[in-house]
Amino acid sequence: MPFFFQYVLKALLLLVVPLLAACDPVQSALHPGGPSAQAIASVWWVMFWGSLVILTLVMALALIALRATPAEKQYRPGRWFILGGGVLFPVVTLTVLLIYSFEIDYPLFRGESEPMNIEVTGHQWWWEVRYPGAGDAEVVTANEIHIPVGRTVRINVRSADVIHSFWVPRLGGKQDAIPGHENPLDLHADQPGTFRGQCAEFCGAQHAHMAFWVIAEPVERFDAWLARQSQPVSAPAGEAAASRGREHFLQVGCAECHRIRGTAAKGDTGPDLTHVASRRTLAAGTLPMTRENLARWISASQRIKPGNRMEDFSHLDDAVVRDLAAYLHSLE
Ligand code: CUA
């Protein structure tokens, strides 16, 4: 009997893990922030309570069998018991669940006829985000997706290298990012909010540091954000450090990989940095966006996120790194 209870205890501990994981609502599929996620969460709850009832039933039967007296152990169940419990019950239960989940899932992929399109490309290990056809200039950003509340947004998911998976648990299901292929995923936020997303397919050493944020805001605020993002940067007005940083940026090699619209920096292998300081995080959710962290990232990116495609610029003087950070932090 103690042996049996050990298993029960382990099963209970395993149940506690998802419950604890759901405590933080920024990235919990159990705190839906829109209709798709709501539908997925309801399927999850039905499956959860259904399995719990069946598990309890099976455990109760197992307990009864274990506690049986030698005389009771002579009992042989009839054919109806084997067929009913072993064949009919699973077939009926699984068929009902299958039809139910199709009923819920199918509308999620039918989509709206004229959604707003956003192109999202997975890279090792960050997300490129493009808003096509917005204003004169195409808006390109990274690791942060702003969407208007109350409107369906179609995310066209792609990959530049290996298979990634785009997932914002509070807004919808997962969509694979496959090289050479485009997969759509419709997101819809009912309320303004900030939702964390995460790459959900192992894609190399820094897979865990491939997060992003989705910021759902009222239409007017979204439009203002998009208009601001579509502007190229002008020469830094304030600090002298920022002006020096701008020169360094073009000279020490940053511009080979990064683009800053409005300057001669036109690299396209790394994230577009035109309005980098307006983002919440640095290096795909790895560090909060601060001037100090920008400096740390420039001089020690390989220590912070080993294996990422940006080399350490540890050979630069501290003063140069500080100027670069001052410049990048001015790009709001
Ligand atoms: Cu990209 Cu995991």
Image (cartoon, rainbow, N blue to C red):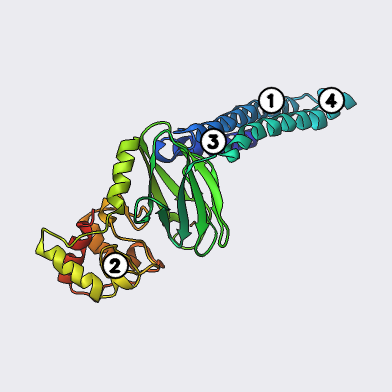
Cβ of disc 3 within 8 Å of ligand 1? no
Say whether disc 1 or disc 4 marks the residue closer to the N-terminus: 1
Disc 2 packing (10 Å; few <14; some 14–19; many ≥20):
some
* Residue drawn at the location 41% of the way across and 68% of the way down: 307
Q: Give the position of the N terminus as an image quadrant.
A: top right
What is the spatial separation of the Cα atoms under label 2 and label 4, in whole angstroms?
A: 66 Å
Viewer-proximal residue among 272 and 45: 272
Q: Can you identify the residue that label 1 sits on?
A: 57
Under circle 2, the secondary element is helix
**From this viewpoint, which residue is outermost toward the front?**
136
Q: Quadrant of residue 220?
A: top left
Q: Is residue 135 left or right of residue 109?
A: left
Disc 4 packing (10 Å; few <14; some 14–19; many ≥20):
few
What is the spatial separation of the Cα atoms under label 1 and label 2, in whole angstroms?
A: 56 Å
**Looking at the image, do the residues carrying marks 3 and 2 touch, with CB atoms under 8 Å apart?**
no
Under circle 1, the secondary element is helix
* Residue drawn at the location 51% of the way across and 35% of the way down: 37
What is the spatial separation of the Cα atoms under label 3 and label 4, in whole angstroms?
A: 30 Å
Where does residue 51 sit, x and y in percent of width and height? Answer: 64, 30
Where does residue 269 sit, x and y in percent of width and height? Answer: 40, 68
Q: Of discs 1 and 2, which sits in the foreground?
A: 2
Q: Is residue 310 left or right of residue 240?
A: right
What amino acid is labelled 3 in the image?
Leu
What is the spatial separation of the Cα atoms under label 3 and label 1, in whole angstroms?
A: 17 Å
Q: Can you identify the residue that label 2 sits on?
A: 300
What amino acid is labelled 4 in the image?
Phe
